[in-house]
Amino acid sequence: MSTAIQYLQRNIRSEILKSRRSATSWLTIIGALFVPIVYCIVYLSYPEKMVPGPGANPWERLLAEEWMFVSFLLLPFYIILVGTLLGQTEHKANAWKQLLAEPVPRYSIYFGKLGIVLLTVAICYILFVGSSIVVGYFVGWVHPQLGFWKYTPPVGDVAVLVTRLYLVALPIMALHTWLGIRFKNFVLPAGIGLVMIIASLIMIRGWEYQYVFPYTYPTLTLNAKSTGSLYKHEYWAIGYFLLFSLLGYVDFLRKKDA
């Protein structure tokens, strides 16, 4: 067991080094900071329209609006691109033949890929939350009437929401890591993701079986009432993640050198 973990750790470290030389790092930074910067500009430009009502916590509006936007569009696109790009690193370098010839177990290669995708998306989530809080305090310092310094951010509620949104994104990460490794052409897995996002925007409007379609999960979680237990679609998310991870690994075992 310890040897298996060592192999996996070694490959994750290798994937981290390779990701630093790719567009993924910049994509993560841009993806995390884009929406907070936009809201910073809006709050600085139109402070009179953003002043909360009497007794209202301005953090709730800021964080709710930001999450609503990123959950519908930005994060699904980001996750699809990250999973596909990191999965295709060896395709672009024509390095699969060399990598598969190395005396390392294939599970460490595949799950090392998946592990770096999971880690990269987690970093993006953390950067997004952190930058949102920084923006709130900054615009509150520039325009005290916005009231951000009179209240504290709902850190506990945000942590629960972020954890659940990360959970429901797991199937998309697993699927697009698999597709990125499976197909040499970047357009195909990215195009599949785009079609699925468009389909989810249609399904989320009232399809009875939304919970079976993973791309609707971020929106379902954001719109659901807060409870102490997992929602139905979150159980499905765990199942899909395990399924896609297993299918991707089995498919990878059959991979030759291209």
Image: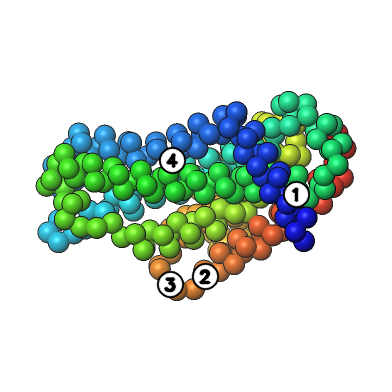
Q: Is 53 placed left or right of 112 in the picture?
A: left
Q: Which x, y percent locates residue 230?
A: 52, 70
Circle 1: residue type: Tyr
Classify 239 as above or below 174. Answer: below
Q: Which x, y percent locates residue 169?
A: 56, 53
Q: Residue at x 36, y 63 (%)?
A: 156
Label 3: how many Cα within 10 Å (few below 14, some 14–19, many 20+): few
Q: Is 69 placed left or right of 116 in the picture?
A: left
For mark 2, give the secondary structure. loop
Which is more foreground, mark 4 or mark 1?
A: 1
Q: Which x, y percent locates residue 170?
A: 60, 54
The Cα–Cα distance between marks 2 and 4, rounded to whole angstroms, is 26 Å
User: Which circle's residue, 1 or 3, is located before the other in the chain?
Assistant: 1
The Cα–Cα distance between marks 1 and 3, rounded to whole angstroms, is 39 Å
Q: Which residue is mark 3?
A: 227
Q: What label does residue 7 carry, if any?
A: 1
Q: Quadrant of the C terminus?
A: top right
Q: What label does residue 32 carry, if any?
A: 4
Q: Nearer the viewer, residue 26 or 218?
A: 26
Which is more foreground, mark 2 or mark 1?
A: 1
Q: Residue at x 58, y 32 (%)?
A: 20
Q: Residue furthest bottom?
A: 228
Label 2: how many Cα within 10 Å (few below 14, some 14–19, many 20+): few
Q: What label does residue 103 carry, if any?
A: none
Circle 3: residue type: Thr
Residue 156 seen anywhere in this rendered image of the structure: yes
The Cα–Cα distance between marks 3 and 4, rounded to whole angstroms, is 27 Å
Circle 2: residue type: Leu
Q: Which residue is mark 2?
A: 230
Classify 249 as above or below 35. Answer: below
User: Which circle's residue, 4 or 1, is located before the other in the chain?
Assistant: 1
